Image: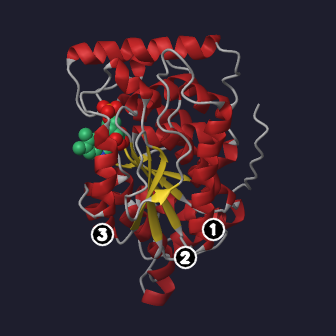
Amino acid sequence: MTDLAVSVEKVSQAHIDSAKQRQLSLTKPPGSLGVLEEVGNRLCGIFGQTPPPSLDLIDVTVFAGDHGVVGEGVTPWPQEVTVQMLSNFVTGGAAINVIASVVGARVLVVDVGVASDTSLLEGLVQRKQIFGTKSICSEAAMTYREARGCFEVGRDVAKDLIRSGSQLLVTGDMGIGNTTPAAALIAAAAGVDPKEVVGRGTGIDDLTFSRKCEIVEAALMRAERSTASLDDPVALLSELGGAEIAAIAGYVVGAAEMRRPVLVDGVIALSGALVATMFSPLIVDYIFAGHLSTEPGAAVALRHMGLRPLLTLDMRLGEGTGAALAVPVLRAASNILSEMATFDQAGVAQVKA
Ligand SMILES: O=C(O)c1ccc[n+]([C@@H]2O[C@H](COP(=O)([O-])O)[C@@H](O)[C@H]2O)c1
Ligand SMILES: Cc1cc2nc[nH]c2cc1C
């Protein structure tokens, strides 16, 4: 196991129980708000507060990195699109900027491992640990030390945002080629066959798809043969990861350590979240799954963590878009518990005994 110390407390069962009681007193048939009730109750457990606070300060963090495996022909897009999209994020022109603005969230963009020099990009948070990963089918993505560095970037960003008042963290990612390491990580962490998790990413033809399957299989076999123990989440990230995926794992851990909810996006974010849960099984109770990406690894990762996606909109963009769209679901779940009238307050009769 890793020597990296992670300290997560159990969510408060007492507050989940008091939230369940409160749900019964509100002017609605018991259970009629379905998953919204479960979300609200879990928010109480996370914050240790019933009702939970209204979610006013929300941060989407887009972690970015490049991937050596792009050289194997797993994506039709050139690697430069990663840095070009970062420029688009910081100037407000990407889908995540639009959706974050609709739901009232801020967007922070962090370079953890982009292959090119991004120092001239104004508005970008510079936390570069590597200039892109190595190709995972022939060697480790990065060293153990580098993986740990990327993880700590995510964890620090999460803790800094929460210390400055953030009440909900949302994961985002950008990295051409990153559905390949995400698939490899999910296959390794969930113990499933690569064929179950490899998908078409940004949209690839049949030939590229079979190449991608072979690459993920080769990467897994290579990683299993390597001396590192794949039960160690940092070793797993160093073998098969991406810089932004390691940072997302750290961001999820950081949120849980600070007792705050984290809303996770598609397959890349879920691969990071899955690795995060390897540090402690208590972490999963701090995670909400924003949506079900069409990328097959997303469903596998969700099933492995026992999480249910809040939205199913056939999205596969990444950037945090699917998670950000689910922000109003969490807000509503929270405000239901704080703002709805009780049967007594509203003078509404309850079911006859
Ligand atoms: O979030 C998802 O589920 C998702 C699914 C497919 C693609 N993406 C995004 O597309 C890029 C990776 O796709 P690819 O085909 O180059 O591996 C990367 O920038 C991701 O944010 C994201
Ligand atoms: C244009 C483009 C935008 C993206 N956003 C996240 N991944 C992406 C991949 C591409 C190719």
Give the quarter of the image for residue 51. Answer: bottom right
Q: Amino acid at mark 1?
A: Phe
Kind of residue at badge 3: Ser
- Nearer-the-camera pick, 177 or 121: 121
Q: Nearer the viewer, mark 2 or mark 3?
A: 3
3D distance between C-alphas at marks 2 and 3: 21 Å
Precedes in sequence: disc 2 or disc 3: 2
Q: Is residue 184 above or below residue 153?
A: above
- How far apart, in angstroms, are the residues tagged by discs 2 and 1? 8 Å
Instruction: Report the front residue among 275 and 156.
Output: 156
Ligand 1 sits in quadrant = top left
For ligand 2, tell me if the residue under mark 3 lies within 8 Å.
Answer: no
Residue wearing tag 1: 47
At numbered mark 2, what does the secondary structure look like: helix, strand or loop? loop
Res. 101 mark: 3
Q: Secondary structure at mark 3?
A: helix
Residue at (54, 70) in percent of width and height:
167
Q: Is residue 191 visible?
A: yes
Q: Which residue lies under the disc numbered 2?
A: 53
Q: Where in the figure is residue 329, as x and y percent of width and height? A: 39, 63
User: Visible in this render: residue 317?
Assistant: no
Give the mark, 1 or 3, whose residue is nearer the N terminus: 1
Residue for point 23% across, 30% down? 203
Closest to the observer: 61 or 280? 61
Instruction: Answer with left or right where residue 118 lies relative to residue 12.
Output: left
Marks 2 and 1 in Cβ contact (< 8 Å): yes
Is residue 294 depicted above or below 336 in this figure?
above
Amino acid marked by disc 2: Pro
The kind of secondary structure element at disc 1 is helix
Q: Earlier in the sequence, mark 2 or mark 1?
A: 1
- Residue 181, x across and y down, in percent: 46, 28
